[in-house]
Image (cartoon, rainbow, N blue to C red):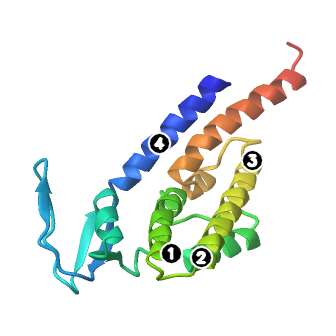
Amino acid sequence: MEKLEEQLATSLNRINFMFRNEKITTECIKSHNGFTLLGESFGPFEKGKKYKVKVYSAIPFIENEVLKVDESDKCDNVDVQRYAIREKEDQKLIRRDNNYFLTKIKEFKVFMENDIKLKKKPIIDFDRFISYTASIVDSRLLKLLKLAKAELSLEDERKLTISEKLIYKYIYNLIKTWRDFFLTNE
């Protein structure tokens, strides 16, 4: 079982790495000359302009108040609350536009922490973010468990995020092995 857990953790970390290489829309809130590191340029940034940058490179600029996540890409406590309510209300798996939906929430927690540190948001917003995130993860996991009793339809598969496809495969195989053990004469 330990090997299975290690494989899952490794795969989830790979998915996280892939998300960090995705681009998000940011807006410059303080001009910056930029810099070059190991042959890759970051900036320059001009106040008021929007930039598409990879998540991993946006983080230090957001933490240092040079950039902020644009409204079109943000994921704060209000957004997470809206997602959580929708997940609770709908008994079926909801298809998300972003295949990295859960990973995005996980990674954007850094931005919420930064807003708290800079006193842009009250600590209660961070607590809500965490609570609603747990609600989303738990709701989607319960829906996955229900789906894992049988093979996925193409429609249901399209509703899964990348990380959910991964866990579904593990859960499905475990449940199938367990059920077959009791339902066959072998």
Decide which of tag 4 and tag 2 comes sooner along the chain: 4
Decide which of tag 4 and tag 3 comes sooner along the chain: 4
Give the image location of residue 115, x and y in percent.
46, 75
Location of residue 148 by image quarter: top right
Circles 1, 4 touching at the beta carbon (< 8 Å): no
- Mark nearer the viewer, 4 or 3: 4
Whether residue 30 can be seen here: yes
Up-down: is 70 above or below 141? below
Decide which of tag 1 and tag 3 comes sooner along the chain: 1
Q: Label 4's element?
A: helix
Circles 1, 2 touching at the beta carbon (< 8 Å): yes
Instruction: Decide: few, some or many residues near mark 1? Use Cα within 10 Å; few <14, some 14-19, many ≥20.
Output: some
Q: CA distance from mark 4 to mark 3?
A: 22 Å
Q: Residue at 49% x, 68% y: name it.
A: 113
Q: Nearer the viewer, residue 62 or 106?
A: 62
Image quadrant occupied by the N terminus: top right
What amino acid is found at the position of numbered circle 4 in the picture? Asn
Q: CA distance from mark 4 to mark 2?
A: 28 Å
Decide which of tag 1 and tag 4 comes sooner along the chain: 4
Location of residue 53 by image quarter: bottom left
Give the image location of residue 10, x and y in percent.
49, 35
Left of 27 or right of it: where is 135?
A: right
Q: Residue at 13% x, 71% y: name it.
A: 44
Q: CA distance from mark 1 to mark 4?
A: 26 Å
Left of 157 or right of it: where is 131?
A: right
Q: Which residue is mark 4?
A: 13
Q: Which residue is mark 2?
A: 123
Instruction: Decide: few, some or many residues near mark 4? Use Cα within 10 Å; few <14, some 14-19, many ≥20.
Output: some
Q: Which residue is mark 1?
A: 116
Location of residue 2 by image quarter: top right
Q: Which residue is mark 3?
A: 145
What amino acid is found at the position of numbered circle 1 in the picture? Ile
